[in-house]
């Protein structure tokens, strides 16, 4: 916990001294179709994850589907933000579990009705949190702070500008 707090304090001080350093481009993720509906996604430092769709959609379910990875990103990013705040405040968490659930209408992804979005229609985040000697109200406030400062959860809430560029080869 101390090393997390020290890293956060060092980075916060550097950004406070030079706010222009707060803006950065995030590492890209590039997906390449392998076969069927299986994709391999790579990052610039060798990060790799694979996706696939369930059999009902024509996949082989050999890997998580992309929507699950979105929920995983929301859950893990929110948990990370909560843990970072707890470390900064000196709170020793005994339990932290974040679950992201969603609903969608498969008519959208299948193109059965152009009026129905393929996007998630609802996203719910549930936090289970505990810390010795910490009142429930304080833990609730910590979880809410983490939700408000999770980049992935914030992105899901605000619907950022989105652009599509297509290169035909």
Image (spheres, rainbow, N blue to C red):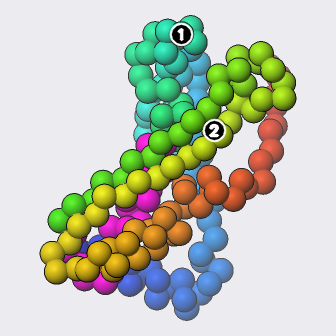
Q: Residue 1 location in percent, x, y? A: 22, 73
Q: Residue 121 location in percent, x, y? A: 65, 40
Front position in the image: 115 or 31 = 115
Point 46% across, 70% down: residue: 144
Dominant secondary structure (helix, strand or loop) of the stretch shown in magenta: helix
Q: Which residue is mark 1?
A: 56
Looking at the image, residue 158 sits to the left or right of residue 145; the answer is: right
Start-end of magenta stretch: 71-93
Q: Which residue is mark 2?
A: 120
Local SS, label 2: loop
Number of residues whose C-alpha sits closer than 10 Å to that of mark 2, classed few (under 14), some (14–19) or many (20 or more): some
Disc on res. 46: none
Point 60% across, 77% down: residue: 21
Above or below — where is 48 with respect to 82? Answer: above
Point 55% across, 91% down: residue: 17
Q: Residue 20 location in percent, x, y? A: 65, 80
Above or below — where is 53 with respect to 163? Answer: above
Quadrant placement of the C terminus: top right
Number of residues whose C-alpha sits closer than 10 Å to that of mark 1, classed few (under 14), some (14–19) or many (20 or more): few
Q: Residue 132 location in percent, x, y? A: 15, 75
Q: Is residue 143 magenta?
A: no
Above or below — where is 41 with respect to 88? Answer: above
């Amino acid at each position: 916990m101390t090393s997390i707090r020290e890293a956060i304090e060092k980075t916060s001080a550097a950004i406070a001294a030079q706010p222009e350093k707060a803006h950065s481009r995030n590492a890209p993720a590039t997906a390449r179709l392998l076969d069927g509906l299986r994709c391999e996604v790579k990052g610039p430092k060798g990060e790799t994850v694979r996706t696939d769709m369930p059999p009902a959609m024509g996949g082989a379910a050999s890997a998580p589907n992309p929507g699950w990875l979105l929920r995983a990103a929301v859950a893990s990013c929110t948990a990370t933000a909560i843990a970072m705040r707890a470390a900064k405040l000196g709170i020793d968490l005994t339990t932290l579990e974040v679950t992201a659930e969603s609903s969608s209408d498969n008519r959208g992804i299948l193109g059965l009705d152009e009026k129905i979005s393929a996007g998630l229609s609802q996203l719910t985040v549930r936090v289970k949190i505990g810390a010795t000697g910490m009142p429930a109200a304080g833990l609730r406030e910590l979880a809410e702070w983490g939700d408000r400062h999770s980049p992935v959860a914030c992105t899901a809430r605000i619907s950022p500008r989105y652009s599509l560029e297509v290169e035909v080869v």
